[in-house]
Image (cartoon, grey):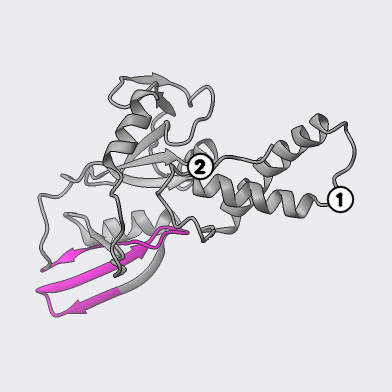
Amino acid sequence: MNQLDTMIERDVAPSAGTIDMKLEVVVIPVSDVDRAKRFYGGLGWRLDADFIVGEEFRVVQLTPRGSPCSVHFGTGIPSAVPGSTRGLYLVVSDIQSARAELIDRGADVSEVFHRAGPGQPPLSGPDPARRSYFSYATFSDPDGNEWLLQEVTTRFPGRIDSNATSFASASDLASAMRRASIAHGEHETRTGGQRDENWPDWYAEYMVAEQAGKELPA
């Protein structure tokens, strides 16, 4: 068992609670509400609300594409020093495609980097083996609040409900199907190169196992 597996095993709770508690909003501190609204809207984030009550209160809510969690910023709401937020994770299934899209939309995104393991210094380029959780890129909003892109294709065991499979967007589903297609081609090669008429069942089994962090079918 390697260091990362040991950390995961140690930190996983023995049982889950019975009441759903869904993180739905994160407040980020900004100095110019309209500027922040233009920036995040320009990234393609959905504008859910812009509530103004006089000059003392305003709250803007936007949601990244495919995300169950939104961001709030505005005036008259509890907040920290503008630009002081760090380490806001945006999980993507393809780090290079996500970086390219953000750049096209006007964000100043760092080069992709990876880490050999937890706590290790950053290394240039995506993870050579494209391991899930190991490839990153960063960008900041006009105030300096920093976002961290992280490529995740397969979840660690216990990170999702093993009895449910879902995808945040059509692009995430398409990426999962492409990975299953490559794996299935290798499966057909191992079984003599014959066409597998039950490929839909194999795809489904592979995609469910991959997302749940279980052993993949051979």
| Residue 197 image label | 1
- Number of the label disc, if any, that sits on residue 154: 2
Q: Which residues are magenta?
A: 50-76
**Looking at the picture, how far across and down is residue 200, in whole percent?**
76, 54
Amino acid type at mark 1: Glu
Task: Name which residue type carries label 2.
Answer: Thr
- Give the secondary structure at mark 2: loop
Residue at 29% across, 73% down:
50
Q: Nearer the viewer, mark 1 or mark 2?
A: 1
Q: Is residue 111 left or right of residue 174?
A: left
Give how far across and how far down residue 158 sits, in percent: 40, 48
Q: Nearer the viewer, residue 207 or 137?
A: 207
Examine the structure image and report whether residue 67 is included in the region drawn in magenta: yes
In the rendered image, the quadrant that contains the N terminus is top left
Q: Main secondary structure of the magenta part?
A: strand
* Along the line of sight, the residue nearer the viewer: 97 or 142: 97
**Horizontal side, residue 206 vs residue 36: left or right:** right
For image coordinates 56% across by 45% down, the residue present is 210
Quarter holding residue 12: top left
Residue at image location 13% in from the left, 74% down from the top: 57
Determine crowd level at label 2: few under 14, some 14-19, many 20+ residues with C-alpha closer than 10 A: some
Mark 1–mark 2 CB contact (< 8 Å) = no
Specify which label sits upstream in the sequence, 1 or 2: 2
Q: In 3D space, how far apart are the residues under numbered discs 1 and 2 (Cα atoms)?
A: 26 Å
**Above or below 55: residue 176:** above
